[in-house]
Each structure stands twice: as C-alpha cells, then as structure tokens.
Image (cartoon, helix red, strand yellow):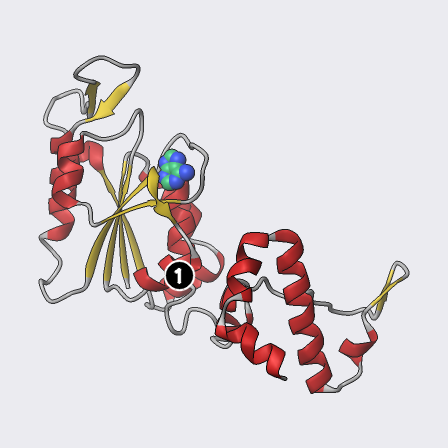
Amino acid sequence: MNFHILTLFPEMVMHGLNTSIIGRAIKNGLISIEAINIRDYSNNKFNKVDDYTYGGGAGMLMQAEPVYLAYKSVESNIQPNKKKRVIYVTPQGEPFTQKKAKELSQSDELIFLCGHYEGIDERVLEEIVTDYVSIGDYVLTGGELPTMVMIDAISRLVPGVLHNDLSAETESFHNNLLEYPQYSRPEVWRGKKVPDVILSGNTKEVEKWRLEQSIKRTKERRYDLYLKFKTSQKCIDVLKK
Ligand code: ADE
C-alpha cells in the first residue's frame, strides 16, 4: 500500500510516521509514505498558495491550482489499474471509523489532501476528491494530524504489519464491542489482584469472562455501540450459549 500526502508541512507528517510499528512496516517494504509539498507547485515567485475568499469572510483559502498540480504529480505516476482513493481530511467529512479504515485498507494507493487556513477552493475538491473524512467533531488547525491518525489505523490492517494478525479479531470495535480488561505480571500490584478466573487456566471460563466484561464496558462507556451490539447476530449467538 502506498500513501501520498499533499501538505504544506511535509516534515510534520514524515517525522511523525517514521517510528515504531509504522516505521518498521516502511522498512520492511509493506507500506510506503511520501509527502508532497503543495508549495512547490505555487505559480508565483513568493511561493504563495493562499488568497482571499470571494464573497468576503475571515481568513485565507488555499488556491485550486497548486493543489491540483501537486495532485497531478502523484496521479501521473500511478498505473490506471491500481485501486486509488483521494481523501480530503475535513471536519465536514463522514466520521472515520474502524469500518472506514478497513474499507480504505483495500486500496493500493491512498492520496491524502491536508487543508490549512480556512480550507481549499471547492472547485479542485470537486475535481479530485473521492472521500471526505473527519476524525471527530472538533476543529484542528490543519489536516496533518488527522492524516497521521488515519494512516496509522489503516496501516495496521495491512497484512504483515502487525506481528499477530489475530489481534485484529479480538480488539475494540469488533462486533461493536470494546475490548475487555487485560493484565500482566505481577499477580498482585499494590494490593490489586488479577481476577481469579484469568489465572484459572480454564480457557472456556476466561473467554466467557472476557465477553461479559466487553459487554459491560461497552454499555458503561459507549451506549451507542452497545445498542448496535444488542441488535446484532453476535448478541443472539451469545444469548444462545
Ligand atoms: N481538519 C481540521 N479538523 C479536522 C478534523 N476534525 N477531522 C479531519 N480533518 C480536520
């Protein structure tokens, strides 16, 4: 999977994504990440890429042409048979969820467009964007952090990136449930003991306890997800047992 990031701050994204699991995935050739500086495609000698908004309003807008040329520099190197998406990260997008991460992880080439200032001229968005995606109902100063969040979530779904691909099956949001509590050594930490059932060695009982805990935690912390779980096949299967 190849990620291409159109941004005014390439060092920000490249620095942030080159460590830990994602850094290792890049080293192992499972994913690649490049940042394209939109400013390099400015058509004036001051490298300016923003201008006033027609019709009035506060702030500056990123102009269409530098964004388009930066996009074209990436797109012209992608073979037509590749599965490609162009994502504009914006608070006006659809919510980014584990489901959306899974959907996007099926692509070969993902191009992220990071906005700044008051946004980007609508005409270039209409021309190139396939997906408008938001990471939550709050406004950040630019699209770089949301892009890093999404690339992290998508990369770990690429086969081979996580050592243990099975963990994707048991982690939060699978079946609309949050993950159960987990414990490591020591057995007693500052007077708090690991639950007996976890130490029992009875796999069936451990599994049952974990599912109960997942349901309890989801009900307490994410009632919206709990309601989805309640009407799912998984819930029917659990109640049958
Ligand atoms: N850009 C600014 N805020 C954002 C958000 N919440 N999600 C995605 N992109 C953004």
In the image, residue 92 sits, relative to residue 5, either above or below, namely above
Q: Position of residue 151 (x, y in %)?
A: 37, 54
Is disc 1 placed on a helix, strand or loop?
A: helix
Q: Nearer the viewer, residue 163 or 98?
A: 98
Q: Nearer the viewer, residue 47 or 79?
A: 79
Question: Which amino acid type is marked by label 1?
Answer: Lys
Q: Nearer the viewer, residue 69 or 204?
A: 204
Viewport quadrant of the N terminus: bottom left
Q: Which residue is mark 1?
A: 99
Q: Position of residue 209 (x, y in %)?
A: 71, 75
Left or right of 202 in this view: 124: left
Give the residue at x 79% y 78%.
197
Q: Position of residue 123 (x, y in %)?
A: 13, 33
Rendering quarter of residue 118: top left
Left or right of 16 in this view: 208: right
Q: Is residue 28 visible?
A: yes
